[in-house]
Image (tube, rainbow, N blue to C red):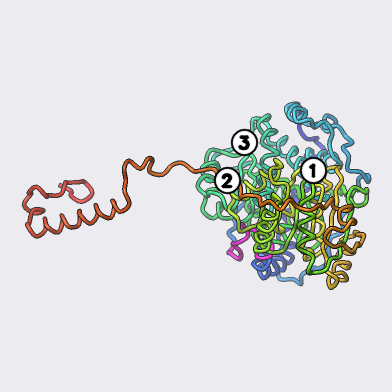
Amino acid sequence: MPHPSSAGAAARRNSSQSRKQRPERFGKNRAGAQSRAGAQNRAVAERRGDNDNARRGRPRHRSSHGRDARQAPVEQPANTEPAVWEVSEQPDSEAPTTAFAELGLPEKLLDALSAQGMEKAFPIQAATLPDALAGRDVLGRARTGSGKTLAFGLALLTKLQGGKSASRKPRSLVLVPTRELALQVNDALIPLAKAMGLWCGVSVGGMAFVRQEQALRKGIDVLIATPGRLADHMRQGTCDLSDVQVTAIDEADQLADMGFLPQICEILDQTPADGQRLLFSATLDGEVDTLVRGYLTDPVTHAAQASAESSGLMDHHLLVVAARDKTNVVTEVAAREGRTILFVRTKTYVDTLTENLRNSGVAAGALHGGKTQGARNRVLSEFRSGTTPVLVATDVAARGIHVPDVSLVVHVDPPADAKDYLHRAGRTARAGASGTVVTMVTHEQRRTVRRLTERAGVRPKSTNVSPGAEELAQITGAQTPSGVPVPEPKQKERGGGRGPARNRRPGNRSQFTGNRAERRAREHRNGEHRNGGSGAPRRSGRRFHG
């Protein structure tokens, strides 16, 4: 694989000069963004239900090589006007069009891609890879499921080829909003990294900190992390970002919505000032624009905005239902054939609805931020395998969870805003497939949901439905559930502990402890512990020193 073009390298050298002017310009934007994020983050964390979004508002520590360590921000009025970026729009199609071999990737990567049956690039990959391989900062705008993971993954793996990471010093960084997305990105990149002789690692909340520290100490080339946990590693000195050559930020709009902006700024400030930045987002407004202004140098922007809606791959429906019939309608929809995701707003309702569905004969799994990471992994694994064809989830699953062949997404509870609608809907009709999105609304919710879908840019068809209605079956494939309760899946028994019982009986430990205390009291009365009698304690280096 040839190295990036000399023209691209020259552009990088020239553009690096403009970075020195950035702290003054960015200080005014970041101050306002951080104050807004700090005020909203905990409320957002509760709404999102993500365990990794619990640490906020901590002071930032900047190293001497950080972008903003060179001078203090200048007090100026906040600039609220969004940047206008020159966008390269791609054709209105999500089908792969360009062969990976035409993009200048290393032979080892091409072989690894071919082994997985991937010969052609999706539009966002074909658009961004040439500039990313040339060393340019890239801003990619694309819907979920459009292939963004390989768009940045192939670029950073190519740049890292032939090198080796030092202990606790990753050479590339991928920031994502949720644990599930981090694990998914890791799974996608591991076979490609292995072909290049590179190591991937994950640093996320809800998983053992010590194991992550051990992996960092051994050396990681590609670190995939959520901002909260990575910030913890940085503060404890278990991760040093001074060798990071490429930073990719995936789902940047969700990171901003979840209140991660202070951590992202803290992290980026610790990476080299001339490092390459690759930012991908469904939208480029608000605080995403603040990140772009502050940390990307002369970015080239590509937008693969061909959506499933515009290409006719995704059908949208409003199912108007009486409040008293809603539970029965949802149950019939969940009993359909095929993979289905039901989105609700609260963790409590996830558990309640999942239990009701299983009692009705529907194999459903629950996914929300209150679950342990092991439980979440198990539920997703069963959903992917088809053992559990129905997933009931909060918005923790609305981004980044790529499960093939999800044919129906149901908004059991209408989403909070247009962004949430689109990202929930993005779980179906991915990578050129087709799918259906339905929103359950009561008569009182119709006007509010209509306004929401208009802001989302979709025009759903409205249909009045009731349990057993023919229209319900035509739209969703709903059917009457079996009524035979589905038992909870058995969890694998964990080994370890103290081994076989060896004739232990309840109370033996306390009985022995009591006998020992009684014996010591008797020895003390008889003076045996001082006279070296039969009850004298054994000498040990911990209590006696000669």
The single residue placed furthest to the front in the displayed view is 483
Separation of marks 2 and 1 at Cα, in angstroms: 26 Å
- Tell me whether circle 3 and circle 2 mark residues in contact (CB < 8 Å): no
Q: Quadrant of residue 36?
A: bottom right
On the image, the x and y values in percent for residue 68 come to 66, 58
Viewer-nearest of labels 3 and 1?
1
Q: Which three-letter amino acid code belongs to the residue tagged 2?
A: Lys
Magenta residues? 45-59
Q: Is residue 503 left or right of residue 145?
A: left
Viewer-nearest of labels 3 and 2?
2
Q: Which three-letter amino acid code belongs to the residue tagged 1?
A: Asp
Residue beneath label 2, please? 490
Q: Residues within 10 Å of mark 2 (few under 14, many from 20)?
A: few
The label shown at residue 405 is: 1
Viewer-nearest of labels 2 and 1?
2
Secondary structure character of the magenta stretch overall: loop
- Toward the viewer: 66 or 157? 157
| Residue at the (82%, 45%) spot, across then down | 430
Q: Residues within 10 Å of mark 1 (few under 14, many from 20)?
A: some
In the picture, the quarter occupied by the N terminus is top right
| Residue at the (87%, 56%) spot, across then down | 472
Say above or below: 202 vs 24. above
Q: Earlier in the sequence, mark 3 or mark 2?
A: 3
- Toward the viewer: 198 or 447? 447
| Residue at the (14%, 59%) spot, across then down | 521
Say above or below: 201 vs 48. above
